[in-house]
Image (cartoon, coloured by chain):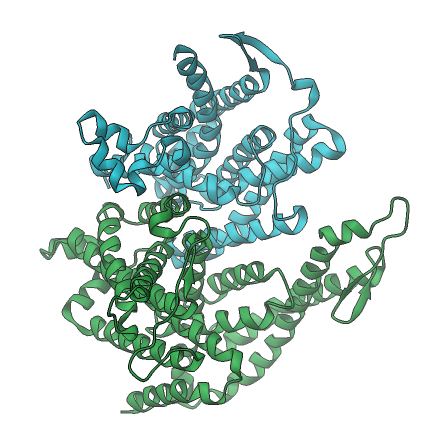
Chain colours: A cyan, B green
């Protein structure tokens, strides 16, 4: 039991850090532009596919560096050539454009890489275990993912906290009009933040894609998880996104390991056989619906605290 | 009076169309009607109330499954009139919509969109696990039972059943927009806070609108179940939710029948080209983005905006600029299609199988021509026409703008 708890906690925290690399960009962009970029998780997917393509020809580290930069360029292009022209028609139009981009990006990825997942794998040189706990070797690569995420988070924090650009970005997040009135080039800052957000998601993709699967549906599947994170954490709040990312990461890794169902829970209060008889939803094992757990958590949070954990009341 | 006349004409066309359409197209027409009704239901929520739902497939699919369950029950001896089967879909849409609406309408704006998307994804991930309700991965299938003199074995009979339901539901949706509550729906889109200050309970209003929209979506799903006699969990896919967004906004969310127009154009397009290309979702996405960027009110909105020139009698001066702007449009379309189709063929698995190590790269067939991957013609054709199109794009836009408003520029 202790073994399960420790390993699940480690895995969950590291997965959560990876999720935070994706959700932080989304929440920053929302704070500034007031829109949610539905194609944000597609940037993760692009990072993974670019990483795969570059790894095949030049090696893993090149993929990790160049892939995310290419993703950042695509992000900048989307902001500049698609989102900015429709900004005058309102936020709903911008959201619709990003929603449409999800499907265009997916189709293009399928065009070049096929409809099924690609064999993007971690390089042999990184395929070793750093230490072993409870007799199982813990893969070094997981720690590398966690480490890179922490470094990225530190960089982002330092940039926002201690540099002049960071101050302008934070000002533009809170009061875009005021920042513009003070003579800062807010549209440029928008593009910059959009690009950095895409780059972060791309780094997460190039790293995580090699460990998890890299498939064309990732943009939608991961997208839903990331939206749950920002709804739970409260849009526009970085600390909220951080807490929610870790929470969802932990829930994800723990629920895979639990073979319990609602009927088992009902048995605790003496309704076990009744619940078994109902069947359907009641006897589904938690482990087989682990993917839906984040959404259930979101619904609960919505009922209890509609603004999200750290969000402002709307 | 003129309006009633044109509506009667439209209805007459819809009634007479199956008599003239070739056999397999009757089924396509049924699909068009279903898609149009689904798009109108979606538009009640997203276009009129301003709540963008990215998960409307959930209620559509629930309606389809509820109707199928009723059909299965009818097979086992229940006395159910076949024409009334889709009502089960509407009822299921109503119940599930009310339940989900309670959650989704807790937040507005972009939160609402994300929550609806997540709820639909919840259904999609649970459905294959629930074999009782949704038939697992295989899905459910059933048969239409005969009723009175009708045996519902021909496509035409099914078409008229669907036509009756969708015309009735569309009329209902239209008259809803005329009621005071329907006006409140529009007010909610324009300024929610103000509606609240006027003393209305906006949360409850939103739940009611959400439920109504889900009910009609469920009805559309029920009609689909009657037409297809089967359904599986793929109906819950995000792609289904996305296609209804496409219908509504390509057709024009601001015009009542706009979404139906979008559904008609995109459904017919998808049937027409499904044998020719595998990249249809890509083209649909491109059309959607182009409409969003260049004609934000959709095709229906563009048509509606031509009322003024036609009435004012100055429409002839629009002809020349429109003809001129066809040149860049055609050039860019040609360039995109050639480039995408060639890339698709060069990167396909079938092409990879043809490659012999060290050998020459074989050509691919497209539009009755062999294209070699490293010949100049192959890439000059799309690039050249793209350059031409981009060069003429701005002048043609300026030309059109000047025709609309000679004072400007």
Judge left or right: residue B105 versus residue A47. Answer: left
Q: Nearer the viewer, residue A217 or B282?
A: A217
Counting from the top left corner in percent of width and height, residue B31 is at: 44, 71
Counting from the top left corner in percent of width and height, residue A61 is at: 68, 26
Counting from the top left corner in percent of width and height, residue B41 is at: 31, 65
Residue drawn at 60 percent across, 13 percent down? A129
Residue drawn at 22 percent across, 38 percent down? A303
The correct choice, above or below, for B112 with respect to A132 in the image is: below
On the question of residue A249 being in view, the answer is: yes
Location of residue A2 by image quarter:
top left
Location of residue A127 by image quarter:
top right
Judge left or right: residue B349 versus residue B333. Answer: right
Location of residue A121 by image quarter:
top right
For the N terminus of chain B, the quadrant is bottom left
The correct choice, above or below, for B68 with respect to B9 in the image is: above
Counting from the top left corner in percent of width and height, residue B87 is at: 26, 67
On the question of residue B252 being in view, the answer is: no
Count every numbered label the image shows and give the total: 0
Q: Outermost residue, left direction?
A: B199
Residue drawn at 35 percent across, 63 percent down? B221
Q: Outermost residue, right direction?
A: B359
The correct choice, above or below, for A90 with respect to B317 in the image is: above
Q: Nearer the viewer, residue A231 or A13?
A: A13
The correct choice, above or below, for B246 with respect to A80 in the image is: below
């Amino acid at each position: 039991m202790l073994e399960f708890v420790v390993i699940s906690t480690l895995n969950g925290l590291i997965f959560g850090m990876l999720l935070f690399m994706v959700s932080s960009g989304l929440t920053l962009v929302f704070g500034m532009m007031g829109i949610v970029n539905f194609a944000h998780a597609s940037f993760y997917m692009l990072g993974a596919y670019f990483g795969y393509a570059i790894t095949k020809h030049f090696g893993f580290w090149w993929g990790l560096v160049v892939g995310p930069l290419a993703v950042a360029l695509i992000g900048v292009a989307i902001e500049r050539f698609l989102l900015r022209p429709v900004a005058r028609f309102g936020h709903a139009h911008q959201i619709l454009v990003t929603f449409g981009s999800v499907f265009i990006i997916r189709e293009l990825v399928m065009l070049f890489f096929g409809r099924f997942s690609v064999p993007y794998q971690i390089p042999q040189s990184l395929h070793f275990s750093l230490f072993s706990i409870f007799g199982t070797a813990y893969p070094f690569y997981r720690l590398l993912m966690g480490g890179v995420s922490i470094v990225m988070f530190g960089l982002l924090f330092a940039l926002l906290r201690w540099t002049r650009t960071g101050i302008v970005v934070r000002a533009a997040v809170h009061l875009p009009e005021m920042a513009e009135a003070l003579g800062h080039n807010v549209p440029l800052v928008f593009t910059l933040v959009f690009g950095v957000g895409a780059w972060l998601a791309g780094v997460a993709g190039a790293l995580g894609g090699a460990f998890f699967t890299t498939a064309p549906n990732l943009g939608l599947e991961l997208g839903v998880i990331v939206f749950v994170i920002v709804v739970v954490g409260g849009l526009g709040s970085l600390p909220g996104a951080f807490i929610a990312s870790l929470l969802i990461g932990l829930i994800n890794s723990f629920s895979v390991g639990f073979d319990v169902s609602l009927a088992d829970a009902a048995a605790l209060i003496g309704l076990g056989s009744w619940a078994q008889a109902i069947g359907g939803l009641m006897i589904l094992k938690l482990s087989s619906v682990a993917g839906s757990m984040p959404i259930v958590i979101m619904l609960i949070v919505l009922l209890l605290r509609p603004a999200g954990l750290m969000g402002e009341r709307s | 009076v003129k309006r009633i006349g044109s509506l009667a004409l439209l209805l007459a066309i819809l009634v007479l169309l199956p008599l003239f359409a070739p056999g397999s197209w009757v089924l396509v027409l049924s699909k068009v009607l279903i898609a149009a009704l689904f798009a109108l239901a979606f538009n009640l929520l997203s276009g009129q109330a301003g709540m963008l739902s990215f998960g409307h497939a959930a209620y559509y699919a629930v309606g389809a499954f509820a109707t199928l369950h009723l059909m299965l029950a009818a097979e086992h001896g229940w006395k159910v009139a076949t024409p009334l089967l889709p009502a089960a879909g509407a009822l299921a849409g109503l119940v599930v919509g009310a339940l989900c609406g309670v959650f989704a309408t807790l937040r507005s704006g972009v939160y609402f969109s994300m929550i609806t998307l997540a709820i639909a994804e919840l259904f999609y991930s649970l459905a294959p696990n629930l074999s009782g309700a949704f038939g697992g991965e295989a899905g459910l299938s059933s048969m239409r039972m005969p009723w009175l003199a009708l045996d519902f074995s021909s496509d035409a009979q099914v078409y008229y059943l669907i036509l009756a339901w969708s015309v009735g539901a569309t009329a209902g949706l239209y008259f809803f927009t005329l009621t005071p509550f329907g006006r409140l729906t529009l007010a909610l889109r324009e300024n929610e806070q103000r509606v609240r200050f006027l003393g209305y309970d906006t949360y409850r209003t939103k739940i009611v609108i959400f439920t109504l929209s889900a009910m009609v979506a469920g009805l559309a799903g029920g009609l689909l179940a009657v037409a297809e006699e089967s359904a599986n969990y793929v109906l819950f896919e995000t792609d289904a939710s996305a296609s209804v967004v496409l219908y509504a906004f390509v057709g024009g969310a601001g015009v009542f029948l706009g979404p139906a127009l979008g559904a008609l154009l995109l459904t017919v397009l998808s049937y027409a080209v499904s044998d020719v290309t595998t990249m249809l979702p890509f083209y649909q996405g491109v059309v959607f983005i182009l409409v969003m960027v260049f004609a934000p009110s959709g095709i229906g909105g563009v048509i509606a905006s031509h009322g003024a020139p036609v009435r004012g009698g100055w429409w002839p001066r629009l002809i020349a600029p429109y003809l001129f702007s066809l040149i860049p449009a055609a050039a860019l379309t040609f360039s995109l299609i050639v480039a995408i189709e060639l890339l698709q063929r060069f990167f396909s698995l079938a092409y990879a199988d043809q490659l012999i190590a060290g050998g020459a790269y074989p050509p691919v067939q497209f539009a009755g021509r062999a294209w070699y991957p490293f010949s100049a013609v192959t890439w000059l054709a799309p690039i050249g026409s793209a350059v031409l199109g981009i060069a003429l794009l701005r002048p043609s836009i300026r030309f059109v703008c000047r025709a609309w408003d000679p004072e400007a520029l």
